[in-house]
Amino acid sequence: MQATFFEQPILNSPYEVPSRHHALDKDGQPLDQEPIAGRRRSELITPVPKPRKQQRKAGDDQTSFVLSGGDGLSTIEQEYNPTPIINEIRSHIASWRALPSPADWGVTPATASLLAHWRSYDFQDVRPFFCQIEAAETVIWLTEVARRDKRYKHLWAHVEGANKDANPELMRLALKMATGSGKTTVMAMLIAWQTVNAVRSPTSSLFTRGFLLIAPGITIRDRLRVLLPQDPDSYYRTRELMPADMLPDIDKAKIVISNYHAFKRREIMEVSKVGRALLQGRGAPVETIESEGQMLQRACGELLAMKNVVVINDESHHCYREKPQTDEEAELKGEDKDEAKKNNEAARLWISGIEALNRKVGVRGVYDLSATPFFLRGSGYAEGTLFPWTVSDFSLIDAIECGIVKLPRVPVADNVPVGDMPIYRDLWQHLKRNGKSLPKKGASKTGNLDPFSIPSELQTALYALYGHYEKTFEIWKRVGIAVPPVFIVVCNNTSTSKLVYEWISGFERQSEDGEKEQSHLGHIELFRNYDQYGNRLARPNTLLIDSEQLESGDALDPQFRDMADAEIEQFRREMVQRGGAGSVSADSISDSDLLREVMNTVGKPGRLGEQVRCVVSVSMLTEGWDTNTVTHILGIRAFGTQLLCEQVVGRALRRQSYDLNDEGMFDVEYADILGIPFDFASKPVVAPPKPPKPSTRVHAVKEREALAINFPRVIGYRKDLPDERITAVFKEDSRLLLTPEMVGPCRVLLEGIVGEGVEIGPEILEGMRKSEISFHLAKRLLYTRFREPGDPPPMHLFGQIKSIVRRWLEEGYLECTGGTLPAMVTYLEIADKASELIHLACQPGEGRETRVKAILDAYNPRGSTNQVSFNTTKNTLWTTGADKSHINYVVCDSDWEAELARVVESHSRVIAYVKNQGLQFDVPYRDGSNPKKYVPDFIVQVDDDNPDPLNIVVETKGYRKLDAQIKAETMHNQWVPGVNNLGTFGRWAFAEFRDVFEIEKAFGKLVEDAIAKYKEGTA
């Protein structure tokens, strides 16, 4: 960033319409220019400096679509820009606001009185910021003015359309406001506007006295109590948000404040599995979960007696209905996938609760407030897509230029010449790349982890950021600020957080007899929880928090409870002392409530958390954490989305002081950030789509009907072997090659850190005799291949089968390579493969007819080329001869298939042929115990001088694995004889071509042999 920006980042009063803004380049970076007059347009930008050292990437200068770049790859980038509608609404409201006479505002008298009060009243304390008034004005103008004026019909139509697509049952308006810009005040203004109008115009359909306020957690829910008219700190009175004559009206509002977790339907009866079965008996399942109505009664209470309430969502980016699974979601892995799943579950629960309330009593409108009203990753929308029903925007750069929030500072360079990103810009990824990952979730359950083992880069980062904190601490102390600045560390899980917490603040270890064995004072002096003698301080300087556990409202996880046990008891003792000798409040409050109280009062004089200096947190701390004394943040976790980066950084953005300087503006305050890759893209990130490939229709040509080929749809086989005798004819395809790839490594070298290594293998199996092997294999063959389902095994065949198996072994049809042993054929998976090969070789004894018949699909026994019709994007197509194929193209998967098409079309004996694609011609077979489908390559119909043409199923194959052997054996021994024995589908044969250069010769010989065989049979 240029010096001009840092010399004077604040350009405007927080109470006036912004009149100047800094010039930014196309990447959102400040230019070294004088500020520009006028207000900045709404754009999706975030004021974060780029790294000083950056590698130039191909396409950096491209501002439009780029097709088929020099490397032949598509680099299309789609952009979605939702801000024009926001800017248009903003311009109309500016003109409307400038109208001098309230009579021209087009609003109710009550609304006009409120607007005049907010805009011009002489407030005794902090007055509403301009951004707060503008947010409320936007909702009011759209509701009371634009909705009734034809000039603005397209604006309201935009809002309706956005909701119809994403929230079909609801009407939502989203207000985008930077963290720290005062969303709670805007909520109070909207409630006051609605309530006063509802009281004074009870027949109006635009207003209501009923409000449901929904928060993402208990912390915000508790903080929103200031919106209750009866609360001692009620904003309507303490912040003078209403004229005195309207205060009685606000008392008539019905306001329920809840966190979205309340919408989860709870168990109403704890029943064990056995108890549930006893209660159910022979009847319907016992319903032990509350109904939707019971859930609403619990969550919404007195609002159910009203009609058409208004819902206000705080941190509304957690509330949406996700699209069905998309490619983007399917591609997510690991922590990103878990994060997306968690986001969607929370969003689904939140929006479902509002929809349930709408069905019950009706929801007049939903007002969403968030600094980041964007769809999250995995939602089905592009990550970072602004809610399309967003109608107002006061961004972080606007808030900085008005001085409403702190200015975040992030690393832009370092003295380590590795890559183009400073290491501490994304510490987690650096550690991961260098194989220095921190403990996984649950690792601490296996015992105490060693705090001294944290990576050196992390220690340096802690020391570096703490060095700057120490200077800030001294300055605050010198000027008389009663509370200390706050340093927060955001970790990925409880194992990491405990490790870092102990490294920072100190730890104790106990011996097996429970005695104190050792203690460490902690590496960071101002954050230590122990004095110089190893005794715990009466008031801890560092706090360990699991934000998600505290926000759910459930009891603490036992593991985390054990981690924070000492701090919980310390705070409980302090609470007793503060409450006096007779106080029992500390005993009645739960552990989670106590920790939440401490967290919520960090930096607040006279409260439990006033002197906390460092907070080590799992997750990101709660979003509603309104502590304004945070000055430093260190991130030690993966940040899968830039939205998460902004939310974490937002924990440090609230100003410490709201005193104006002599120029009527705020002084600059800073927040220093390490470990968070805060590079927020200026626009939503959309996965670059691939350009559409040309598509070709492959179909049966009506004029070639005479070339149609019909085939049977076989689903199985019936092979009646005689009771007296079974023989087996083994061929090359009966061979089983046993490799380490099939059974696992057979030679493994083990070495210790010192001493001699040892090589191990499965030599113990060498002792199994052939008779034992053949017995096991014969038994498997008998039970799985010669027994009908439900029938007892035909034990009278066991002797013959065992002899066949033994011959298979002795004649070398089992080959062992790579250290494998014959006994391994008794492994269940291998035994099934061997059984299938042997079974396919089995035939009836001499003098008996083959009794193999194909079993056809009872509902669809016949297939035909008439049914072929599909589109393909493959570009290797063979245009078929009009006199050789019913289908217009052969879609070639290999050069082999193109060569076969050429050969069959050039042969005079070929009547017709078809490539088996879109034909739905398959052959059932078994690979071991697994039933499978084999899809051959071609069907070729040949004239072999027989009145009934010969149909040849053709396979082109190079290297044949075991699976190909089983397919070929199935065709020769089951499918072909089974179909031919039916006598209803003509004559069939099977052929494989394994040499692409010999296909023409091999096909010619195949036809000649078929002709010779027919002549021999008729001679």
Image: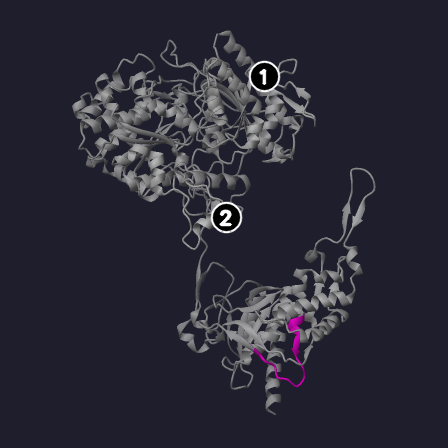
| Residue 467 disc label | 1
Marks 2 and 1, the one that precedes in the sequence: 2
Q: Give residue 219's quadrant in the image.
A: top left
Q: CA distance from mark 2 to mark 1?
A: 61 Å
Say if residue 74 shows up in the picture. Answer: no
Element assignment for label 1: helix
Q: Which residues are magenta?
A: 838-852
- Which amino acid type is shown beneath numbered disc 1? Gly
Q: Position of residue 109 (x, y in %)?
A: 18, 24
Percent of width and height locating residue 979? 54, 77
Q: Quadrant of residue 853?
A: bottom right
Structural crowding at the residue carrying mark 2, measured as other residues with C-alpha within 10 Å and reported as few (<14), some (14–19) or many (≥20):
few
Depth check, mark 2 against mark 1: the one in front is: 2
What's the mark number on residue 365?
A: none
The outermost residue toward the bottom is 1019
The residue lying at 22 percent from left, 31 percent from top is: 144
- Residue 295 as seen in the image, left or right of residue 416: left
**Colour scheme:** one colour
Report the amino acid beneath label 2: Val
Residue 274: which numbered mark, if any?
2
Could you say where residue 460 lies in the image, as x and y percent from the top left?
62, 23
